[in-house]
Amino acid sequence: MATYADVKKPRPATILSASAVAAALLLGLTAVPAAAGDVTVQLTTSARSEAVKWYARHLDCEPIEGRAEAIDCGNAVIEFNQGPIMGASQGTGIDHLGFSFADLEEKMAELEAVGVRGSGVRLQRYDDGSTLREEPGLFKVGRIFDPWGTRIEVVEDPDTLGFHHVHLSASDPVRTLGWYRETFGGVPESLRGVQDGLRFGEVWLFASEHPEGQPAPSAGRAIDHLAFEVADLDTAAVGLRDRGVRFTADPERPAGGRSGAKRGFVSAPDNVRVAVIEPGWQGVDADFGSDADEVASAEPYVVPRTPWGTPDLQGMWSGNKAHGIPLERPEDLADVEELTAEEAAARRERGTLGSIWGYEREWRDTTLGYVKSAPSRQVAMIIDPPDGRIPPLTEEALERQRNARQSFGDYVRRRPAGPEDLSAYVRCISRGLPGMMMPSIYNNGLQISQSPGFVAIQKEMIHETRVVPTTEREPLGPGIRQWLGDPQGRWEGDTLVVETTGFNGRTNYRGSSENMKLTERYTRLGPNRLEYRFTVEDPTVWTQPWTGRFEFELDNEQYELVEYACHEGNYGMTNILSGARARDREEAAAAAESGSGAQ
Amino acid sequence: MTKRRHSKPWRRALSLAGLMLALLVPVQAQDASDPVPRHYDGNPDINGVWQAINTAHWNLEDHSAAGGPAEYGTLTTMPPGQGVVVGGEIPYQDWAREQQRKNFENRWREDPEAKCYLPGVPRATYMPFPFQILQGNTHIMIVYGFAEANRTIHMDKENPEPAPIDSWMGRSHGRWEGDTLVVEAAGFTGQAWFDRAGNFASDTLRVTERYRPTGPNTMTYEATLEDPNVFTRPWTIRMPLYRRLEDNVRVLEYKCVEFSEELLYGHLRRREETPTGDDP
């Protein structure tokens, strides 16, 4: 009988870079008992199509005909479910997955070339800077992370290519592997006499001692659960219960199940969630969140009033639902009326992953589970012109653009001599208008407050507040120009209309100038829906006005504005400028050296 | 003097009948015997643009005139002023008085105001900038003239929760006690100063403010400051606030970040031109 004492210990390593991570990766490993043939693995993420693409591109898995939410990784199938990720796989009872490649150096070089940006690949580096090491008696190994927090060990084991293993983290590894063997029938085997484990078909199951205390529950984390297939679930359930296995969910056909197959959940050692499924299991249709508010109600919506009689727009609104809607209609979506729920989820995921890098997943509202509702299915913000594109620039604007010193790309490329070389947003001065109203990757709160005669519009992102009068007042004189202009509001029926001019022109929204006139229309469309329409007129820049729209969503229950003291905590500015000066010094030193060498 | 104080059930009924209320408001406003304008709910109406007129932003305590950086002549001089601390002096613990003196010596570089940092409470109130009170039905917003500072004073929470995280402006809960708006603020970072003289507290500061209208255009502002880690006992500042009476007066945008950048980042500026500079 094999012993399970000789287990791998996690070794120290430095993380190369924080990855751009999102989505819940819920791994269900459907292993068929040893007697049966193939193993199936089941994974879940909040952006199924993105996850399928990632595993296909980087780990050589293959899409499965007729299933958009699962992928075939050779020895196992990984299935992706929809849901927020509550943390990475490490620290739970399912520490990581293993994949094996014939030429690991080549594979690692390929993964390193992808980079961490967007839905890239994060590599873990060892202390000496390498990404691979030779495991004595075994083979080369390296470690990477998928964008959703699943830790993946890549190995070079020619005997088992593709999906290689699941590595558990256990309080008592021997007892844990014993439990899996007795419960699901894995075959005890030793990997080259070095590492003992269980074999489910081709897939290895290993267990190492958990570093400290109890492993955290796997449910809700990047690898949510493993799944094992049994021939007859009802009969098997009786046997499992007889052996003291506790079902946390009785076998049943789940809501949204894509086949008639049943599934149940059992509680495994080390807080690991394990599913037991029937043959023919085809996964569960994605739940993309509730769209209940968008269902047309038979009753017309009556906009509430403040005690002093105006429409009441007050509350804690969130732009999270709109995050990911592009300003302009993408050319390949010219005739699309709206996205499907799944496309919308995937788009927001891309927006979240792609818009920023080096930020931990913990920053992102859309992946933290704060966003309970479905992402917007709107194709683009711009509704006028009808093609969804910003109208052509005027001759004057084209000329100005040609002479412009600082496009956004310049901000990125130019090594700043001082803070002035960075954007107003990076400097924590202002996002300008309409930039300030746009959904952002995090801190999407919008608090609207009202008093008789005034509406205060406060955005969480870099804490900008506009106080809008709803009774007519004298505009500011031309000697006063403001980043956020001079607003004048009025009520048109249930709609708050705000016209703003008097901009200083320094935030330059898509080329806008100090001559911009912004007309905004805020309308409650339902108890939780606030439509935001904005029309940009700037005859010195665009040949015609253009209008966009998106919606904010009421979130009074869980959202509170927390002060975003952007400037006070702008360590980024210090670091950017310090880095730039360090490069200056390096270059000066190199120039001096080559100068003296030439003498 | 007739006060239109409503019992709670009556007020609740009123807030349900929004349209009826809209009719009631002008009637209340016409009551000539009441010097304080009334909000829809019968509480004082403190909506508007207000400002303190004193030298508390230089020093809460009594202070004689003192010079500033000499190159600007008298533009940076601290004018003399009578203190606003009830009883005269701030009851610092010995170490804290010592720290305040150090702060004063280093004020031109260390004062968070110079860095355009959020001013905190109560400092935002008596800085030489107007502020606007927006008094609604669930909360009161105060938008200050300095550094985009603002506060949400929650009026609708029976059992205030502690602040989820420390912040410069803290978390504020308000209630009406008669005609006085009482605001309890806590959850501060402890990094803010009270004035340009380096008076300060720590992150265990609790501030109880009292805004008591004394007429249509004036109110008395009081703030009681408690911080057992810095002071020997709670102490209070008191001053009048005045309504800004100019037609069309407003709190203008004062985004001061860019004016603080030389102070904060000047040492990281490229000083002489080098032949290179742009990354490929």
Image (spheres, coloured by chain):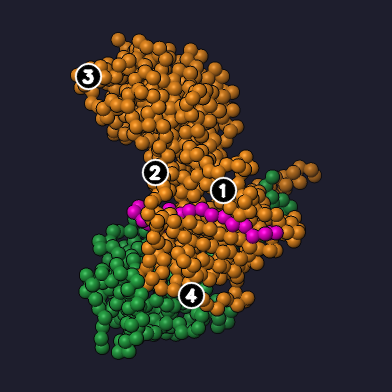
Q: In front of the other: label 1 or label 3? A: 1
Q: Kindly identify which numbered label has been placed on residue B131.
A: none
The residue at 40%/56% (across/down) is: A300
Tell me the kind of residue under disc 1: Ala
Q: Closer to the observer: label 2 or label 3?
A: 2
Q: Chain of mark 4?
A: A
Tag 4 residue: A471
Q: Residue furthest right?
A: A599
Residue beneath disc 3: A238
Q: Which residues are magenta?
A: A542-563
Residue denoted by label 2: A290
The green-coloured chain is labelled B
Residue A103 or residue A259, whichever sits in front = A259
Please give the residue where the numbered disc 1 appears in the rendered image. A380
Label 2 close to label 4 by CB (< 8 Å): no
Looking at the picture, how far across and down is residue A285, in whole percent?
41, 32
